[in-house]
């Protein structure tokens, strides 16, 4: 029997691709950094140089 994952990296996954690595959690985004770069502009984020 395995325990449910309530805390830690295993409990959070990317909404888009399902990976558990490099999750962006601020603003409840819950996307990995790779997926975030692809959809950031559609979410209203923009780059500043």
Image: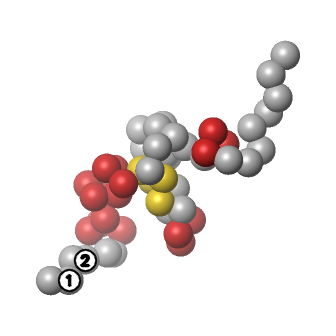
Q: Position of residue 47 (x, y in %)?
A: 21, 77
Q: Position of residue 29 (x, y in %)?
A: 50, 62
The residue depicted at 15 percent of the width and 83 percent of the height is 49
| Name of the residue lying farthest toward the top | 1
Image marks 2 and 1: residues in contact by CB distance under 8 Å: yes
Q: Residue furthest bottom?
A: 49
- Residue at 52 percent across and 56 percent down: it is 30
Q: Position of residue 4 (x, y in %)?
A: 79, 33
Residue 37 falls in which quadrant of the image?
Answer: bottom left
Q: Is residue 46 left or right of residue 24?
A: left
Residue lying at 26% horizontally and 55% vertically, measured from the top left: 38
Residue in the picture at 41% in, 38% down: 17
Nearest the viewer among 5 and 39 is 5
8 is higher (above) or lower (below) than 45: above
How many residues crowd around disc 2 within 10 Å: few (fewer than 14), some, or many (20 or more)? Answer: few
Graded by Cα atoms within 10 Å as few (under 14), some (14 to 19) or many (20 or more), the crowding at tag 1 reads few
Instruction: Please say if 15 is above or below 41.
Output: above
Residue denoted by label 1: 48
Residue to which mark 2 is pinned: 46
Q: CA distance from mark 2 to mark 1?
A: 7 Å
Q: Is residue 37 left or right of residue 33?
A: left
Please name whichever residue, 1 or 31, is drawn nearer the observer in this view of the structure: 1
């Amino acid at each position: 029997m395995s325990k449910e994952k309530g805390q830690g990296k295993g409990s959070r996954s990317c909404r888009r691709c399902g990976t558990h690595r490099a999750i962006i959690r601020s603003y409840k985004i819950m996307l990995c950094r790779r997926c975030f770069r692809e959809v950031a502009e559609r979410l209203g984020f923009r780059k500043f140089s």
